[in-house]
Amino acid sequence: PDVIVNAAAWTAVDKSETEQQMTRRINADAPGVLAREAAALGAWLVHYSTDYVFDGSGEAPWTEADTVAPLNVYGQTKWEGEQAIVQSGCRHLVFRTSWVYAARGRNFLRTMLRLLRERKEIPVVCDQTGAPTSAELLADITAHVVREVTRQGVARPDLSGVYHVAAAGAVSWYDYAALIAEEARRQGERLAVESLV
């Protein structure tokens, strides 16, 4: 292959604390194997990482040059995966993203929609902010960048690196949940929820 895209990850953040071995195998070891194979083949490796490689402090958006400081097993193993890729010497595009949502799969949007239909009261934290990013946006960006790095006659090893890819803006989990509820009602959904707390 010219390009290997690794969209696999252990993303159950809380469960990572009790399933550390499995989390490490999927988030750190497997990307290392893919990176070594990509290096041997001369292929590009596209890999998705996370904002959890940072400690969540501060007010400004994180940059690629900021020092990582994971606070949990999930963030630590994603960082280890990034390092394995970089150290392999393969041409790579590591996309750090945040709060990914989609119409399918397990994500905050789908979980919140289910809870809004089932419960009268839902506790949601308001002291964490981030940028909800659609899987569709990530796919579009990936397709564009892969086209760029694999164009015939154009060698672009200078594009190899770690990039932050997230939607613009920021919102708290609480405000995100409130927006989901508001939009669901606007779309005619019958919700059981009476309040977010």
Image (cartoon, rainbow, N blue to C red):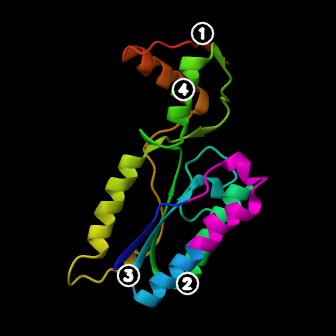
Q: Residue at x 42, y 16 (%)?
A: 189
Q: Which residues are magenta?
A: 9-30
**Residues under labels 4 and 2: Cα distance?**
42 Å
- Sort mark 2 into few (<14), some (14-19) or many (20+) by Cα contacts within 10 Å: some
Disc assigned to residue 73: none
Q: Is residue 143 visible?
A: yes
Disc assigned to residue 194: 1
Vertical placement of residue 173 versus 31, above or below: above
Report the amino acid beneath label 4. Answer: Arg
From the image, tell me which residue sits under label 2: 88
Mark toward the viewer: 4 or 2: 4
Left or right: 134 with respect to 49?
left
Left or right: 51 with respect to 22?
left
From the image, tell me which residue sits under label 3: 157
Report the predominant secondary structure element of the magenta stretch. helix
**Residues under labels 1 and 3: Cα distance?**
54 Å
Q: Secondary structure at mark 3?
A: helix
**Residues under labels 2 and 3: Cα distance?**
14 Å
- Mark 4 or 2, nearer chain start: 2
Vertical placement of residue 135 versus 38, above or below: above
Q: Is residue 67 visible?
A: no
